[in-house]
Image: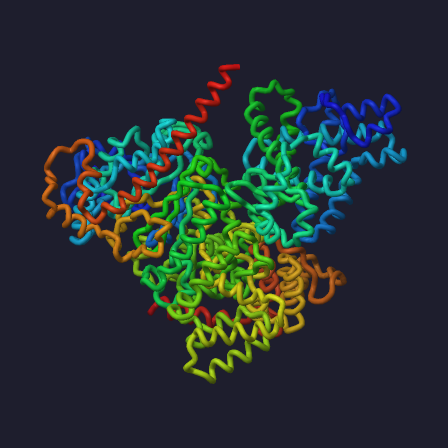
Amino acid sequence: MTTTDSTEQATKVHSKSIAIDADALEVNGTAKRPAGEPQPSPSKRVKVEEETSMADVSFGDEADDELLASMDLDYPVVEQPSKQLVIPVIPAPAASSSSEEKHFIELLKVFYQWLFPWKLFYRWLSYGNVNKHVFQNREFSFTLPGDTYMRFQSYKDIEELKAHIIKFCPVKIDLGAVYNMKPKDKKAVRPGAFHPWERELVFDIDMTDYDEVRTCCSGGDICRKCWDFMTISIKIIDRILREDFGFKHILWVYSGRRGVHCWVCDERARKLTPEARRAIVSYMEVVKGGEGVSRKVFLRDPLHSSLRYAERVLEEHFEETILDNMKVLDTQERWSKVLAIIPYEEIRNSLDSEFQANEHMSSAERWDRIVDELARRKKGSRDTVKRDIIFQYTYPRLDSNVSIGLNHLLKSPFCVHPKTGRVCVPIDPRKCEEFDPFAVPELSALVDELNSSSNVKVESGADGEEGEAKSAGTSLDPHIKLFKAFLSEMDESIRESLRNKRAEEDRKLNF
Amino acid sequence: MLKQQVSTSAASYVQTAADKRLLSAYPFSLNFYTDPPPYELTLNEFETYALARLKVLKTCETARIRSKDAKKIDEHIESVVSKELPLARNSQLKGGRVKAKEAYDQRRKDHISHFILRLAYCQTEDLRQWFIKQEVALFDYRFRIEESAEQEAFLRHIDLGLAPITPEEKQTLSIPLQQTHGITPEELKHQTFYRAPFEQVLDLVASRRVLLRNGYAYVSQKDQPTLVSNAFRHKLKESLELTAKALPRMDEDDRLTPILHSLSKQYVSKEYDPTKSAGEIRHDDVDSLESHFPPCMRNLHQHLRADAHLKYFGRVQFGLFLKGIGLPLEEALVYWRKAFHRLTDDEFQKKSYAYGVRYNYGVEGKRTNWTPYSCMKIITSNQPSAGDHHGCPFKHFSPDNLRDLVGRYGCGDSGASEVLRIAKAGHYQVACTRLFELTRGEVHKQANRIAAGGDAEGAGGGGGMVETIEHPNQFFDMSFKGQDSWAGRRRRDGGNAGSQGGPDQSTQASSMEVDR
């Protein structure tokens, strides 16, 4: 086959829909090939497989929402035997990339090689190695430069994973479920015999879901003002998970751009069925309804005890976040949205004309007027409209699909967000108010720190501890310490449950 | 065979051998179906029993679709159960109103028919889910109508292993318990609470009707039916999975296989098959056909036009609908590319919208030829959240917005009020059907009459009755056919809604956008 032929074929198979068979790629020894270089001879053909399995992808994050969302969340995960195409071309990973992108990839390589906390990462995902399948059957997915997608990768140990990641240098790493068999072997079994076994209970909170209530930025942008929404969410959801559901090992992670992820890693959480996850999400969810609905919150009175706590948090934040920062009552367009929630037409109309007449009223003053009017109408008995407005404007908004399905993917902690260059670092929920997304270490700065740091010799030995060792002294260090603390607590729990199990067995033996 | 100690109210009137047999086999009208029936039966019995139960289960399904009102649902189930699968309660035995022999036969039939359907419905996840759902509904219904003494006896009998919480624990939790259940301290005193892992009471958790602390749910005795029902569901689910695994190895009578096979096929309500009444259409025909779109699709279409974008579920719902009305893949790709005109080619590729379109047509990924969503699917799954325009307007819109949307069909104020009233009562499909009747009923009726040879006059008033709309494509097909066969005479006289919104206008607008 000639070069022209192959290029044509490669174009026909849309690059987005291609999953590279990792093993096949290894034939070439390298994944990166400068554009324009002669294509490899037929003997070095790369097996490229048409993607068959995007059907069950869902993710949480950012720029990829749309891409990811377009892969179905809804259809069952049944794989069909895929057609194998043999195309003598690598879907040129960085062919279209600018020099900026190339630079990013180079930095990323350094990051994976020297800064990514591999050992801790393995300590996390192996869960004490009580059962070796927990790591080996875990699905890893990668987005390679040039938006090529690799799903259902799995590794026997951390060295293999690390080597693979350094080689391909994915711009994004997603973690999937732990399956009943090694995900990379899934093609070997009949469809349906491959299914998810367990997975952390995860939550994804994304700022885009707040677009209808935030006025400072929209879409992918965030500022310190709207970050308050994330702080509120962490406070409320973290408490529910710990106190109501009794989970202990909860990892909050900055998503790298405009949201946060939450990984609940208790054994009980990892074993939850989709139905149980759905119930938990529904227990938390308060804001419901799409664009066609003005009032999205209807809570009963008296409030469920779990929402009492949430209400206190929301009330603490409402004035500053919603009234002073978001200024949701400053223009007619904005206050109409708030007034539309009020079910009493006379109040809506009178307040609307009052607000129009008093152009210079602040949001806080207008809010006081709303509260007054509602209270006057109710006379003594508690009014739920005010409360529901506060909930609608401040209560956490979750992407429920990510939490419910076991097979959904979520971006791994310690990835680097390709758009912002920021590392997805853990957040301490007890100090979530202090977390500043703009102070998160950035890839290029980290690499600079690495280069200027005297104790680092990049060329030195490639064994053992390098991830952890090299990050010491960089601005990534405190975040890694936080991750370590999380892991120590988790290991303690794992040891304890092992001790209990043994004690139980001993007891049985004695009888 | 059941061989447990029987301690039930029924024990007090044991007299005859028939009574004893009833008591030892079926002490309660309720059954957890833990043991398979040890009987021999004829092929005829096998089939009739199974069909009887299937009718009941289907009723359980439709009853819930038709009504949200618990009482109406019960009445509906009752009417079929009393005919197909009557089940005497123990209390009815006391006065001799029902003979022990009769009760035994009823419970035996209930028992056997359940297990036959287990065989038929264990094989795929879909079938299992459907079966479990309906069986649980039937069980709930039967539990509800039992007397409370009998309920309690049954609970003791199945033993869910729940211990009431201690007074001290209740004291510590008294405030949150009061808040959660909205009760006074006095009422709290008289209620018993049970502690269970939250996984056992998921529906109470989901609807926030239970207090949670540290992974435990504190369940009020009032919510006991939920506990029972969940236990029933859980057991059934487990046994079905076991049955599914065991079935291939069972030495089965090959006379049964075809029966089981045909039984399992009967569950899905008939799928609406879009007829592509408009023939194959092109991407630039879509705008002119908008007048035939049902409200959900018109809403999506208008938002797609206004925002040059739709979120994921909107794309799927609308994309499959367009596929159903006859937009072939190549045209669909052009259509969506043009619709998302604010994106550059690069962005469009990058976000893999084209992949999504091809996926819908079964040429990507799983390669399934997806069918357009039915009303039921749109109403029940993927609830829209912020920024979403998909869903069923009759369910997901607030009254004001719905009135607005409906108003654009030109059904007049009183018509809109009527439709809104129906929608508010939870009859979303009926509301949609009514809207169709009001605005297209005449045309539709005329069309049918022409088709039927001219003598279908008489039935239905107030705009012509039509069958209930169960599928957005059905709305489209009915509307399009009506116009098609009658178009020549009435289309442009403005009397009919449906030509509102001016197809020409919107085509112009869109082509301007596209050619910007």
Which residue is pictured at 51% across the width and 47% down the height? Answer: B371
**Residue A352 image point, x, y percent:** 51, 79
Give the vertical position of A475 relative to B388 (above or below): above
At 38% from the left and 27% from the top, the residue drawn is A130
Q: Can residue A148 be seen by looking at this rendering?
A: no
Residue lying farthest to the bottom in this orientation: A357
Residue A364, image x, y percentages:
44, 73
In this rendering, would A185 be left or right of A109?
Answer: right
Placement of A304 over or under A157, stated as above or below: below
Q: Where residue A413 sits in the image (x, y, percent)?
A: 31, 44
The N terminus of chain B, quarter of image = top right
Q: Of residues B165 and A148, which is closer to you in this image?
A: B165
Closer to us: B430 or B337: B430
Q: Position of residue A408 (x, y in %)?
A: 41, 43
The residue sitting at 62% across, 43% down in the picture is B219
Foreground residue among B142 and B83 = B142
State which quadrant residue B79 falls in.
top right
Q: Residue at x 59, y 53 (%)?
A: B179
Q: How many marks?
A: 0
How was this image coloured? rainbow
Please state, as top left, top right, bottom left or bottom right, where the C terminus of chain B lies in the image: bottom left
Decide if residue B220 is on the left or right side of residue A424: right
- Determine whether, in the image, residue B92 is placed left or right of residue A26: right
Residue A89 quadrant: top left
Q: Residue furthest right?
A: B96
Determine if residue A182 is in view: yes
- Which of B350/A156 is in front? A156
